[in-house]
Image (spheres, rainbow, N blue to C red):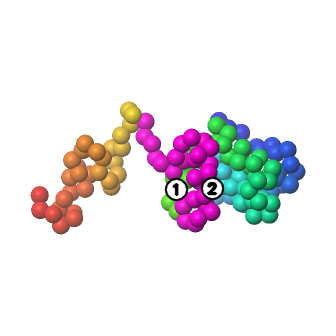
Amino acid sequence: MYSLMMNFTDAQLQQCYERNFAEAAELSGEVRQVRALIGVHDLFQMLEGPHSSRVHETIEQLLVPGLRPGLRCWYQRSGADKDISARALRDHLSQLAGERLEEVVLPADKTPTTGSFPVPGEDVRQITRASHWGINE
């Protein structure tokens, strides 16, 4: 498991991260860290621009392999792509990580057995009866 503590080389980054982390108390684990890091990134990108060393350090922290599950969860949640700047950061991080962070990928041996969507290869009526949609079976 990835440590919840982040250590930055810059004192202002550290303070900003700790403040954002405390404000994200409703979230847990890696998702809370991701939320705090994105807050730090957004602030310093606005203040100093995209080529700032502080922005780069924050991006490095976001891409640490141990934080990747939290990063995926953050971008797979509902409303994650609500604005242009959030999508731009997601796309940038996806490119650097070499994966589409917003895509839900199931392991090959796992298939959903419940839910309200059809699973390829299964009869849709097993999940939602056709009559539910006004279709005669």
Q: Position of residue 43 (x, y in %)?
A: 75, 61
Q: Quadrant of residue 96?
A: top right
Residue that protrudes farthest toward the front in the picture: 51
> Which quadrant holds the N terminus?
top right
Q: Where is residue 117 in the image (x, y as percent from the top left)?
A: 32, 53
Asked if marks 1 and 2 touch (Cβ < 8 Å), the reply is no
> Which quadrant holds the C terminus?
bottom left
- Magenta residue check for 112: no
Q: Residue under label 2, please give it.
A: 89
* Range shown magenta: 80-107
Question: In the image, is 14 to the left or to the right of 78?
Answer: right
Q: Residue under label 1, please give it.
A: 77
Give the amino acid type for the residue marked by disc 2 in the picture: Leu
> Along the line of sight, which residue is nearer the eye, 97 or 4?
97
x 57%, y 40%: residue: 98
Near mark 2 (Cα within 10 A), the count class, few <14, some 14-19 or many ≥20, is: some
x 88%, y 51%: residue: 11
- Magenta residue check for 97: yes
Q: Can residue 28 be seen in this view?
A: no
Q: Nearer the viewer, mark 1 or mark 2?
A: 2
Question: In the image, is 26 to the left or to the right of 129?
Answer: right
Residue that protrudes farthest toward the left in the picture: 137
**Picture disc at residue 93:** none
Give the amino acid type for the residue marked by disc 1 in the picture: Arg
Mark toward the start of the polypeptide (1 vs 2)? 1
Residue that protrudes farthest toward the top in the picture: 109
x 57%, y 59%: residue: 87
> Along the line of sight, which residue is nearer the eye, 121 or 84?
84
Q: Element at badge 2?
A: helix
Q: Where is residue 35 in the image (x, y as percent from the top left)?
A: 66, 55
